[in-house]
């Protein structure tokens, strides 16, 4: 999506956006997406749909800074779990949903690992403007997310397959039935997700951080973030670009494999498509399918691959993979800081730790990790990490190569007896 900025009114400095804070009773100024409307002006502001998305926090985390080897005060967590549906998806959904309404859609659909579907279901039921149809891989979605789609009344189609199968089907179905598709192949989604970066800048008093670290699944976020900074730079609203680190789970590492192992680059808009095809053909021939505890990013063929490698080019980016063990340990450290996240989100923290250990990120640099989804999205993963029940641990986590829970906070079992309870509290507190 390219704008003719010359013909639009764009603020001369980013701090002009702060004036909107004084108009908090105007829903479009309250929205953390639409208060930046001038930077995503594809639908007139009166037509933009908001449910109060984007009231999110950037907070420095001393515990996570120590864990990753960063200097305290230099590592920030952008907590997108605070969105109405509990994940960053609401940023993009408010944008795609607004466009869908603008073009007169009455039904919207998506394939999802759970957060896009929760978000779409929420926008549909809160606004009553459209009906939601969602496609999910059966058994591939965490209970927190499934419960949202069901509770909000979306038509929920469970496909015998994984996210990639659901994605392929939803494309066919939406084309045949003329249903509006809100997956991040939809460019308006990415426009909304740019605003996560605008809010990061806002929280840093409009200073550009050194690094943005983000989990990589379908690669919508990384693509949107690169575009956000590229446009701000072109508009002269920032004077330098941050670096971008995209973190895959080891069990779902298409981007890592293609970029870091096979050297696929944006190459001025002509990436080596034949090499990418060969990679996918081999994946299919060998029957390799993505598998990770971070179910949100359990994706084989990321739909925004090309846009992501463009973002990596713009932001001098790197890609890394982290194991489920590293993800869950990082997640426990984030949780211990109070604003917990779901497994996929913690890939950003695990990735930061890895990049600090490699010397790629320096401890004094300013780093922003994106926490993409709320802790309550996947209670099974969290409880299985902290459990005292070895069978549960083995079943949920051991089967994925997770061997230990170094940062587990285990419940203390005591008989229902006052003296014993008091004894236990004295012993453990
Ligand atoms: N983190 C969470 C919590 C997610 O739900 C997703 C994607 C990602 C990270 C990856 O982001 O696709 O922009 O690279 N979830 C999608 C879904 C696929 O269907 O909810 P990405």
Image (cartoon, rainbow, N blue to C red):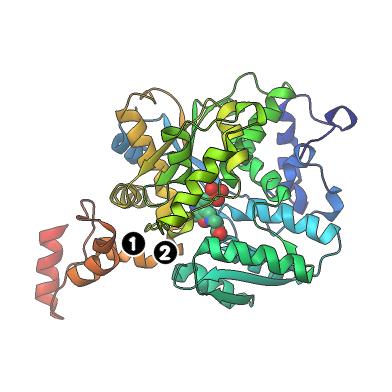
The residue at the point 66 percent across, 31 percent down is 269
The residue at the point 52 percent across, 33 percent down is 264
Q: Is residue 2 left or right of residue 336?
A: right
Quadrant for the N terminus in the image: top right
Please tell me which residue lies in front, 182 or 7.
182
Q: How many marks?
A: 2
Q: Is residue 119 left or right of residue 101?
A: left
Place of residue 150 in the rendered image (x, y in percent of width and height, measured from the top left): 57, 77
Q: Mark 1: is the Cβ under 8 angstroms from ligand 1? A: no
Q: Is residue 281 above or below residue 353?
A: below
What residue is shown with label 2? Answer: 378
Q: Is residue 250 above or below residue 272?
A: below
Quadrant for the C terminus in the image: bottom left
For label 2, the SS is loop
What residue is shown with label 1? Answer: 382
Q: Is residue 216 visible?
A: no
Q: Residues within 10 Å of mark 2 (few under 14, many from 20)?
A: many
Determine whether label 2 and label 1 are within 8 Å by CB.
yes
Q: Is residue 186 visible?
A: yes
Please tell me which residue lies in front, 317 or 86.
317
The residue at the point 14 percent across, 77 percent down is 418
Place of residue 224 in the rendered image (x, y in percent of width and height, measured from the top left): 63, 40
The residue at the point 75 percent across, 37 percent down is 39
Q: What is the spatial separation of the Cα atoms under label 2 and label 1, in whole angstroms?
A: 7 Å
**Residue projecting furthest to the right:** 7
**Residue projecting furthest to the top:** 239
| Disc marking residue 159 | none
């Amino acid at each position: 999506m390219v704008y003719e900025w010359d013909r639009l009114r764009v603020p001369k400095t980013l701090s002009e956006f702060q004036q909107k804070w004084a108009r908090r009773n105007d829903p479009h100024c309250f929205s953390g997406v639409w208060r930046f409307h001038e930077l995503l002006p594809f639908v007139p502001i009166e037509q933009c749909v908001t449910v109060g998305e984007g009231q999110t926090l950037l907070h420095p985390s001393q515990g996570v800074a120590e864990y990753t080897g960063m200097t305290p005060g230099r590592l920030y967590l952008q907590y997108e779990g605070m969105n109405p549906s509990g994940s960053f998806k609401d940023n993009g959904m408010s944008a795609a949903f607004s466009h869908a309404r603008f073009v007169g859609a009455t039904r919207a659909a998506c394939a999802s690992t759970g957060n896009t579907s929760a978000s779409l279901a929420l926008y549909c039921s809160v606004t009553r403007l459209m009906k939601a149809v969602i496609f999910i891989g059966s058994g591939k979605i965490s209970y927190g997310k499934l419960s949202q789609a069901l509770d909000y009344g979306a038509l929920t189609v469970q496909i015998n397959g994984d996210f990639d199968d659901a994605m392929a089907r939803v494309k066919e179905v939406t084309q045949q039935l003329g249903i509006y598709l809100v997956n991040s192949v939809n460019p308006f989604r990415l426009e909304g997700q740019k605003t996560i970066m605008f809010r990061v800048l806002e929280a840093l008093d409009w200073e550009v951080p050194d690094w943005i670290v983000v989990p990589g699944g379908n690669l919508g976020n990384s693509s949107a973030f690169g575009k956000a900074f590229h446009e701000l730079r072109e508009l002269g609203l920032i004077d330098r670009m941050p670096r971008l680190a995209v973190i895959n789970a080891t069990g779902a590492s298409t981007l890592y494999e293609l970029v870091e192992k096979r050297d696929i680059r944006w190459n001025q808009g002509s990436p080596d498509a034949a090499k990418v095809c060969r990679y996918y053909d081999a994946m299919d021939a060998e029957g390799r399918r993505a598998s990770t505890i971070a179910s949100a990013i359990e994706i084989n063929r990321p739909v925004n691959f090309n846009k992501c490698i463009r973002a990596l080019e713009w932001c001098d980016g790197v890609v890394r993979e982290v194991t489920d063990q590293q993800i869950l340990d990082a997640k426990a450290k984030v949780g211990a800081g109070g604003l917990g996240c779901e497994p996929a989100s913690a890939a950003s923290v695990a990735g930061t730790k890895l990049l600090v250990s490699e010397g790629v990120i320096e401890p004094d640099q300013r780093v922003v990790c994106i926490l993409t989804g709320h802790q309550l999205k996947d209670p099974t993963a969290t409880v299985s990490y902290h459990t005292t029940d070895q069978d549960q641990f083995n079943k949920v986590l051991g089967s994925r190569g997770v061997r230990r829970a170094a940062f587990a906070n285990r419940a203390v079992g005591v008989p229902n007896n006052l003296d014993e309870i008091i004894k236990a509290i004295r012993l453990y507190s």
